[in-house]
Image (cartoon, helix red, strand yellow):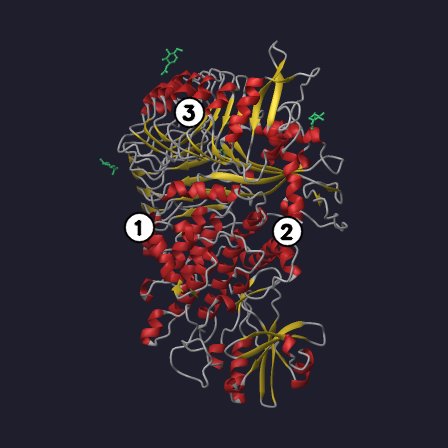
Amino acid sequence: MPKIFLSIVTLVLVFPSNLFVYGAPTTDPTEVNALKVIRNSLYDPMNKLKNWNKGDPCTTNWTGIYCQMESNDNYLHITEIQLFKMNLSGTLSPQLSSLSHLKILDFMWNNISGPIPKEIGSITSLKLILLNGNQLSSYLPAEIGNLPSLNRLQIDQNQISGPIPTSFMNLTSVKHLHMNNNSLSGQIPAELSKLPRLLHLLVDNNNLSGHLPQEFSEMPSIKILQFDNNNFGGTSIPPSYANISTLLKLSVRNCSLEGSVPDMTQIPQLGFIDLSWNQLTGPLPTHKFSTNITTIDVSHNKLNGTIPDFSGLPNLQLLALEDNFFEGSVPPNIWDNTTYSANKSLVLDFQNNSLTNVPANFDPPANVSVLLSGNPLCSNTTLSTPVGSCQFQSITKASGSEQTSVNCQPCPTDRNYEYNPSSTLTCFCAVPLGIGMRLKSPGISDFRPYKTAFEKDLTGLLNLYVYQLYIENYIWETGPRLNMQLKLFPSNTSIFSVNEIVRVRRMLAGWEITLLDIFGPYELLNFTLGSYANDLPKSSGSGLSTGAIAGIAIGAVAVATAVSILATMFILKRRWRYTTMSKRSSLSRFSIKIDGVRCFTFEEMAKATKNFNESSIVGQGGYGKVYKGVLDDGTVVAVKRAHEESLQGSKEFCTEIELLSRLHHRNLVSLVGYCDELDEQMLVYEFMPNGTLRDHLSVKCKEPLNFNTRLHIALGSSKGILYLHTEANPPIFHRDIKASNILLDSKFVPKVADFGLSRLAPLPDIEGTLPGHVSTVVKGTPGYLDPEYFLTHKLTDKSDVYSLGVVFLELLTGMRPIAHGKNIVREVTLKCQSGNTLEIVDSRMESYPIECIKRFLSLALRCCQDETDLRPSMSEVVRELEVIWRMMPDTYSLTTADSSDVDPNLKMTHSTSSASSVMGNTFLSSNEMSSENTESGLHNVTPR
Ligand SMILES: *[C@@H]1O[C@H](CO)[C@@H](O)[C@H](O)[C@H]1NC(C)=O
Ligand SMILES: *[C@@H]1O[C@H](CO)[C@@H](O)[C@H](O)[C@H]1NC(C)=O
Ligand SMILES: *[C@@H]1O[C@H](CO)[C@@H](O)[C@H](O)[C@H]1NC(C)=O
Ligand SMILES: *[C@@H]1O[C@H](CO)[C@@H](O)[C@H](O)[C@H]1NC(C)=O
Ligand SMILES: *[C@@H]1O[C@H](CO)[C@@H](O)[C@H](O)[C@H]1NC(C)=O
């Protein structure tokens, strides 16, 4: 199935080229010969260029070749080479210079290496040089400066080194210089300020040094200046930048800048300013920013003085001032009379400053978060605020679910038909175009308020109806960049015509459209016919039910719904106010039920499990065998049947049942009943159709979990365990947390199993075999065992934290806790110490937000510290996971990364590897959790 599908995709990429044939002309022979030489320097493993040796390039439609009849020489001339994402490697031949009529040179997202040939500097007709996403190295040829018509130079995400040539000052037509994520070094030439048309200068993530040229203030049309992650060792931001009246975005994150913050508040349309992670000193200027501003990030500097008035900024999404020396009071009413909602929120991060008080009647409205921890005001006893949770957060639920399901017949699966979820014309099956698009330098921190504007903008530009576009998902990546998977559906027909596909592709891949300024430049990541949704592999005895496959996709939505229902229960009127903040559990979170547990007869149990037939066995644990059973009323259950060693006195058994029956939590497997007769003891639990977490992490699992689901599983499991530690009376330490004790229901909600059994059953001893008797020696499962417990035999809540940390590492890496004699904790620690953090991440999660991964990893490793005291408490674990969950797409990260795990060598690898993992796959299956889902994760935030 996938193969057939891929070939459809290939067909589309190879579309007819010569749209301008008059009479029977042929291609200029010089150019034909040049193409053959170019072809020979490329390696083409997928044989995409197989028709490049038959006939004439222009008239027999060679892949990616576009021609025009231009001059009077009666020859066709090659005007475009578009070999976007074709798995090509090898080098670019200097013979390219023979294509003297070339306008578009597109080799984006291949694996081409070697230098950019200086000879392309002689192709004066060139308009677009699109070489981003390759392995190009060596220097930027100065000859590129000779291209008078060049409009766009995209060489980002390569390994190009050396300086930016001063000759680029002669690129009089250039609007876009995208050179980010390379190894460029030296001083940025001040001469670039002469470029009359330059709009976007992206040189972030290089090794540039020297200083920011003050001459840039004279740039006539610049809109975006992005310099992040370079090293301008101790120089300052030129005060003249306050005069760049056309500027919309300035980003100089982590550039080793010193000095003061220039007063940019008078720039009329400034929308985004990021000066974070430098050593800037002095106060923040007090004048008003433009009302267009969405993001002000000056966090992690050495700024002091009081926080100026930031009111009257209705579009503000993020004001990050954390980790500075601001003193005095939190300013009042930054939110003013702006209305916030689930789709428009504001984050004010003032953490780790020297603020001493809040204004009287401080009462942030819903959807405005004010983070204050790490300020002296938090330890002010008269405010009775527990240190560490000094924050105001309230997030309301997005109203209504977007799609109400209509009863449509399933679409035929053979031709990638699907319904357009954004259309009101339901039940119309069509084949969409799948488009991967990334906003390289957006002027926003939160996409939600701009989603509609984006839909209107893009469809308007492409001359389509708004309902033809469906934004399948979007995810914030390092940068921040916004990676989106879009689907375009045909209107009133089930498949786009070839002309229409060619038209849309030309507009996108030829940059014939320009999005609204707020979205910044876009890049194209893929363009396919059909989308992966119908291409999910069919289950084939992989150990997962067919339902599991649908479950992964549908589960996302269902989980979201479930989460939000649960959240609504205790978020009702949860507007965090100062006065109630310290009241611990002022709301009773969980209903406590004593009865409701059924007592079954042995006969009933035997009938449910077909007389304890071998075929009904679904597992085996310390307590005994586990059978799948069906009760009389059709309920599917798991029956745990104690083996002889586990049998208890009836009275003790009863006590335990009563204890277990009182535990009710969404993330604990619930007890349905028990059976205690005829020398048999059994516990009956709800059945978890998706099996254990271990099954899903195993290499044999054909539908690996995406990061979103993994994080959700980590959060859920932690909440279940926190409940056992804090709400059970007496508290229950699980003692045997492991991936095979975390079960997944039909919606992939994690449920911790086997809690409390530590009291009923002998656990496997350290050798991993079942002991013949109840032993008081160290128990647990090898690989998950708290090393301190092993040494001291002292069991604490932190032993569960350790085991859970191991489960987190499994979620991140897919590894087993112990494999081939290697211990997961040691392996991961070693890799992190050597700076290869991302190498250990499970490559089957195809894309994920790097910053979330790093934070999750750092949490996991803290849980696995040898020393008990260094491990976080269970409630800290939950809190941190909630923070990470909120950092997931759509909610801007509050802090980008712990300074402790910022490895300067990683920044390049980060973006490159995240991009290549996205690029490496036409079908981004790891992002399939919808944005709604992530949003509803917000509702579950419960600072304790
Ligand atoms: C090349 O494309 C043109 C225009 O779409 C088409 O008419 C022609 O048949 C194609 N030629 C070949 C050999 O495929
Ligand atoms: C820019 O072009 C002019 C004339 O075309 C030339 O003299 C000059 O050397 C060029 N500048 C650089 C830095 O190459
Ligand atoms: C700035 O705001 C004004 C008024 O709301 C709007 O017309 C303009 O398009 C905005 N500019 C940008 C770059 O978003
Ligand atoms: C702010 O810091 C600077 C040094 O960085 C110091 O000279 C100045 O006095 C400080 N101002 C305040 C108000 O503390
Ligand atoms: C808020 O309301 C006041 C008075 O109602 C008005 O003067 C002010 O301009 C408003 N501010 C904003 C940002 O709308």
Determine the CA span between mark 2 and mark 3: 50 Å
Residue 114 occupies which quadrant of the picture? top left
Which residue corresponds to mark 2?
Answer: 536
Question: Which residue matches tag 1?
Answer: 376
Residue farthest to the top?
A: 72
Mark 3 within 8 Å of ligand 3, using the beta carbon: no
Write the residue at 59% across / 45% down: 923
**Alpha carbons under labels 2 and 1: distance apart:** 53 Å
Indicate which label's residue lies in the foreground, 2 or 1.
2
**Which of marks 1 and 3 precedes in the sequence?**
3
Tell me if residue 803 comes above or below residue 621 in the rendering: above
Residue 332: quadrant of the picture: top left
The kind of secondary structure element at disc 1 is helix
Residue 730: x percent and y percent? 45, 76
Q: Does residue 865 appear left or right of residue 46 in this picture?
A: left
Q: Quadrant of the C terminus?
A: bottom left
The kind of secondary structure element at disc 3 is loop
Find out if the beta carbon at label 1 lies less than 8 Å from the nearest ligand 4 atom.
no
- Residue 181, quarter of the rendered image: top left
Give the Cα distance between marks 3 and 1.
Answer: 34 Å
Q: Select label 3 or label 1 by which is in front.
A: 3
Marks 2,1: beta carbons within 8 A: no
2 or 1: tag closer to the N-terminus: 1
Q: Name the one closer to the observer, 226 or 690.
A: 690
Three-letter code for the amino acid on which mark 1 is drawn = Pro
How packed mark 2 is, by other alpha carbons closer than 10 Å (few <14, some 14-19, many 20 or more), is: some
Given contact means CB atoms under 8 Å apart, are the residues at marks 2 and 3 in contact? no
